Amino acid sequence: MYKFIIRPIFFAFDPERVHYFTLNILQLLCKIPFIKPIIKFFYLNNSNHLEKKLFGITFKNPVGLAAGFDKNGKYIKELSLFGFSFIEIGTVTPKSQVGNPKKRLFRLKKDEAIINRLGINNDGVTTIAKRLKNNNTKVIIGGNIGKNSTTKNDKAEEDYIENFKELHPYVDYFALNVSCPNVNNFTKLQDVEFLKKLIPELNKINLSQKKRKPILIKISPDLSQTQLDETIELIINEKLDGIIATNTTTKRNHLKTDSKKIEKIGKGGLSGLPLKASSNEVIKYIAEKTNKSIPIIGVGGIMSPKDALDKIEAGADLIQLYTGFIYSGPSIVKKINQHIIKKNESKH
């Protein structure tokens, strides 16, 4: 029903507008008393066989929602009804920012992909922290943090620290976004020298709080092998809790969409099916290189239950959806979890 009726209607409108329109309608519908139990009935999978403990947190199942879908933590309650065990909000910056000029979100239907150059538009950390304070759902919350576009790279550390302090009481783990391709000079923050300065500072703050929160780093699929090796070494040396692999790509390889259309769209991070193979390669490389000693959240091109299993088999402990949730519809979460249960049962 979703692919043949609902999706064509959604896809007839501007992607960014329809995204927020749909989420706002969902929020309104959930105020009607019987709607929430109906959504839960269709989409939740309450099997104990899916539980996974990672960096001190027990996840009800391995499927989460990637950062960028609910940037401002406005729709956590509603999105958790679809069966996600964790939702990553953000990227959050200290000051609110409008992001890049519109139009900045594009569908590549033939490729089951999206190009975005949103530019980390968000409400700012103070507003988002207040919102999270009132969050009473049981879903695990990840806080994806970054720097403001106007902050120069030599001052970026201060932005991450401010975000970290403000969000610390309200999130279950942190994701350091140092790999967003949609903000000038942002990916330079992936340099190990910057992270060597930042991470000890965050660790100090972390240890001074009532409860330590896990810190993960989100990396680009476009890293060279040398950069990847340096990042792995840094994660081990600085005792980071895990890695999120991967962010969107700036590459435009092997796309079915007409090259003139791609050229016209211009810059932006590509997500969806074309990202699947490179994301899996990065995951496999990290898992093999570290002998599975670093927890990995796999994200990029999960459009079906098989894609999810491929990620897990490559070495991911947990997975996140974004573009697949849009193209395949909300039932994908339950289908993935059912697929994992079946696969586990066939092993025993």
Image (spheres, grey):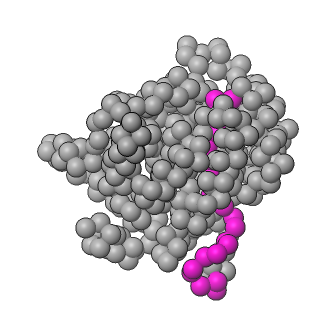
Residue 194 found in image quarter: top right
Q: Is residue 50 left or right of residue 253?
A: left
Instruction: State the image coordinates of residue 304 (x, y, percent, origin top left).
Output: 43, 59
Q: In the image as oriented, which residue stretches furthest toward the left?
A: 34
Q: Position of residue 297 (x, y in %)?
A: 56, 42
Residue 259 lies within the magenta run: yes
Quadrant location of the C terminus in the rendered image: top left
Q: Is residue 344 left or right of residue 315?
A: left
What residue do we see at 65% from left, 44% from top? 218
Residue 91 visible, this angle: no
Q: Residue 92 falls in which quadrant of the image?
A: top right
Task: Determine if the magenta segment contains residue 226.
Answer: no
Relative depth, front residue between 289 and 134: 289
Q: Residue at x 85, y 38 (%)?
A: 193
Residue displayed at 52% across by 68% down: 113
Q: Is residue 6 visible?
A: yes
Percent position of residue 82, x then y: 32, 47
Instruction: State left or right for residue 114 relative to residue 2.
Output: right
Total marks in image: 0
**Which residue is found at the position 45% from the left and 31% from the top?**
52
Where 331 sits versus 168, above or below?
A: below
Determine whether 257 is above or below 53 in the image.
below
Camera-nearest residue between 309 and 134: 309
Q: Quadrant of the N terminus?
A: bottom left
Magenta: main secondary structure: loop
The picture places residue 127, in percent across and down from the top left corner, at 50, 38
Point out the stretch of residues depicted in magenta: 240-260
| Nearer to me, 214 or 225 | 225
